[in-house]
Every structure is written in structure tokens, then in C-alpha cells.
Image: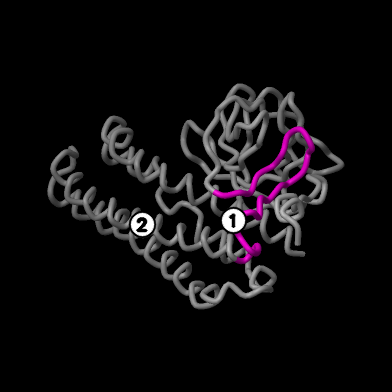
Amino acid sequence: MSITERRAKRLDVESVVLPFLGSRAEDYQTFEYLLQDVSVQGVGIAIPRWVVARENLRQGERLHLHLPFELGGRMLHSGIVTWTRWDEDQDSQLAGVQLDSYAPALYPVYVSVDTKEVAIDMEDFPGLEQILWRVLKDSLLLKRGILVYLKHLTAFFSRVCDLNREEYSLFREVVIEDVRAKVLANAERLEALQPLLGEKEEGTLARLDLSDLRQAMEPELYVDMFRAALGDETVTLFLKAVKELERKLLSNYNTCVLLYINSL
């Protein structure tokens, strides 16, 4: 395989028919969307009625699409909803997103705005399975990082919240411990994939269950539950770090989707 071939693994955007995970910037709410079209004017997405996680998008709000869109050598990840409408034929809400926020891509997998293709740079990886292995290994570390944050925040919240001892004890048991248990379970799901990926064998992607993987990668912490008990300021200051880790996990899941599609 020549260097040119290794660096030119591409797939038309029209061939991408599986949903990705996005989130609202304002409240971190996650939703699923289909990529419709890509151009320098923006990205078209659809939220079909059949997806598991649906949200009603509003014009003017900021969305994180958790996909790197390459334009002029830079990677765009999020933007503002410029229009929305309901499409009866597709049974979906359609929306246009004007991308305006740049961030480096974590992996050599991206959507080219100019060519309207999914591009995977294989220069540093002998196969798609090796990229998948790196993404899932990093995702496990992110889940473990969230567990560390939760451990420290549990003690901290007990000192700064307005709840009395009994109320906080109940909040910790019902909310915080439930979140911790879910994060731990999802970390264990990702860890269970490591032996499968250990040898990075060809064909691993075809055996990947995207539904299970999505469940393992999705956020477990919902800000509104914490905000109601702890107040706006505390949540904004101290849960932002956790939500940033969750955002990286959403991006990692979307990378896995692109790799899976390219393996078919």
C-alpha cells in the first residue's frame, strides 16, 4: 500500500447513515442526529422521530456536534442553529448549523467540508482497528477520570451546599451514588472490550455493538438534578470539569461510528 493510499481512505458523507451524538451547549443535553449535508455555509442535520435520544432544537442556540469538520486545515466542532423545520417525508426535525468554533481533532478521523467526505489519515496506524483500540483505551481513562472527580466532589459538596446533614445524606445516596454506580458500570463495559481489542485484529470493528457502546459512552450526570439541590454557582464551577470529560467521550463515540462505517 502506497503512502498516498494510506492517507486517502475516504467515504462520501452521503454514505454515513448511522446517528451521531450531539449536545446542547447551554445545558449539556445529549441528542442523536443524522448528518445530512456539509458545505462551507454550514452543516445540515436531522433528528428523526425514531432515534432514542431526541431534542427539539431552537434557532439561535449553540450545539456541539462532537465531530471534527475540516475546513482550511482547521477543525470545526460546534456552531449556532440558523434554521429549523419539520420534514414530514423524513419524519424528522431538520436544522442548519453554522460552524464557528475551532478545536484540534484528537484522532486522524474527520469530515472534510471541501470534499464532503469522511477522511481517515492512516499514516500513523496500520489499520482501522488500531485507531479504534486507541479511542476505546482513551475512553476508559476518561470514565475513570470522572470517577475520581466524583469522589472528590462528593466530599466537597457536603461542605458548600445549603442542605442539612440528613438532606445531603439522602442526596448523596439517591443521586451521587447512583451516578457513580452508572459511571463504574460503563467503565467496566469499556474495560471488557480491551481483551477483544488487545491484538487489534482485523474484523474487530465488524463485531462492535454500537448500541452497547453508545450506552457506555453517554453521560451519566445530569446537571439539572445537581442544580436543584446545590444551586447554580456550585454546579457551574465544579461540575464543568466532569461535563468536559463527557464531551470528549461523545466525540470518541462519534469517531467509533465513523470507523465502523468505514469498515463495512
Write down the residue under mark 1. 124
Disc tally is 2
Depth order, front residue of 173/154 = 154
Amino acid on which disc 2 is placed: Val
Residue count near mark 1 (Cα–Cα under 10 Å), binned few <14, some 14–19, many ≥20: few
Q: Is residue 242 left or right of residue 61?
A: left
For residue 18: magenta?
A: no
Q: Which residues are magenta?
A: 107-129
Residue 194 vs 210, above or below: the answer is below
Residue count near mark 2 (Cα–Cα under 10 Å), binned few <14, some 14–19, many ≥20: some
Residue 96 drawn at (x, y percent): 71, 29
Q: Residue furthest front?
A: 2
Q: Residue at x 53, y 35 (%)?
A: 24
Residue 39 vs 261, above or below: the answer is above
Q: Residue at x 55, y 42 (%)?
A: 105
For the residues marked 2 and 1, what is the alpha-carbon distance in whole angstroms?
37 Å
Residue 226 drawn at (x, y percent): 33, 43
Quadrant of the image containing the C terminus:
bottom right
Residue 93 drawn at (x, y percent): 73, 37
Write down the residue under mark 2. 179
Disc 2, disc 1: CB below 8 Å?
no
Q: Is residue 95 left or right of residue 201?
A: right
Q: Nearer the viewer, mark 2 or mark 1?
A: 1
Q: Is residue 162 left or right of residue 184?
A: left
Q: Residue at x 56, y 49 (%)?
A: 107
Q: Give SS at disc 2.
A: helix
Q: Residue at x 53, y 49 (%)?
A: 250
Amino acid on which disc 1 is placed: Asp
Residue 7 vs 235, above or below: the answer is below
Residue 228 drawn at (x, y percent): 32, 39
Quadrant of the image containing the N terminus:
bottom right
In the figure, residue 82 lies in which quadrant? top right
